[in-house]
Image (cartoon, grey):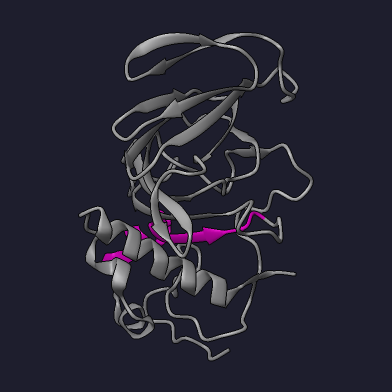
Amino acid sequence: MNLKRSVVNASIETAKEVIAHFGLYLPPFANWTLDQWLDAGPEYNEIRDCMLGWDVTDFGSQDFHTIGRTLFTVRNGRPNQPNYPKQYAEKWLIDPENQRAPAHFHLSKREDIICRAGGNVLVQLTKADAEGHPSNETFLTQVDGCTRRLGPGEIVRLRPGESLTIHPRTIHQFWGEEGTGWPIDGVGYTLSAEISSVCDDLNDNVFLVDYGIRFPEIEEDEARRYFLCHEYPRAGIELISE
């Protein structure tokens, strides 16, 4: 069963509620209607081309509430594109209890995961070997600037304000710790952030699962309220009704 548009819409509404609760503000285009995007000219192509904005995915798991993610990309560059020379990226991530991305690593991206507000974030790390499989080796990373040696599969707990560096070719998952976070309908929500080198979601992710689709097909069971970061119409192109 594909990820449903109704789940995408509801997840964005919840994300906006969580972000507002913690006293943070999204850029104006986070709230743009479909018609506003249709009227947006080429001066907004950085948003389109660098895939800024809302990102809701189940990674092809067909189990969004367990293996899924809702996030907002605030800034990003694009590799080998001189029009977009930024060498950094920033994302805000909504972390419900126990929801996570599938185990994966990045070929080149280096990222800091920061627990911003709410409950705790648990981060599980394992070094990938030369073939991309989990290694039994210990490895070094940084937690709030302190270098630590971790064992394979070790979990680091980040409390609000704490952060951890994930180096390239480090297999990772992270999620909101159960029993922590701001409750909505019985589920605790934490807000985290990712500060990284340029994010290339089309080429830089290596998933350790059989599915591992970064942008899965969406079942249109209700009307779209927002364009996701990979759905924007090009400037001057009319939206075809679905």
Q: Residue at x 67, y 53 (%)?
A: 213
| Quadrant in the rendering for residue 54 | bottom left
Q: Is residue 53 magenta?
A: yes
Residue at (25% x, 53% y) in the render = 22
- Residue 57 or 183: which is nearer the viewer? 183
Q: Which residues are magenta?
A: 43-59
- When asked about the image quadrant of residue 42, the answer is bottom left
Q: Quadrant of the N terminus?
A: bottom right
**Direction bottom: furthest residue:** 241
* Residue 93 shows up from this direction: no
Q: Which residue ends up furthest to the right in the rendered image?
A: 210
User: Does residue 92 show up magenta in the picture?
Assistant: no
**Quadrant of the rendered structure where residue 146 is?**
top left
Q: What is the tally of numbered marks visible in this picture?
A: 0
| Drawn side of residue 236 relative to residue 5, left or right | left
Vertical comparison of 235 with 116: above or below: below
Drawn side of residue 98 relative to residue 185, left or right: right
Q: x and y percent of residue 205 in the render? A: 60, 40
Residue 149 at x, y = what percent? 51, 8
Residue in view at x 41 percent, y 16 percent: 142
Q: Give how far across and how far down residue 74 sits, in percent.
A: 32, 52
Res. 139 in view: yes
> In the picture, which quadrant includes the C terminus?
bottom right
129 in relation to 81, above or below: above
For the residue pair 236 and 213, the one nearer the viewer reads as 213
The residue located at (50%, 63%) in the rendering is 230
Q: Position of residue 99 (x, y in %)?
A: 56, 49
Please determine whether, in this image, residue 164 is positioned above or below residue 60.
Answer: above
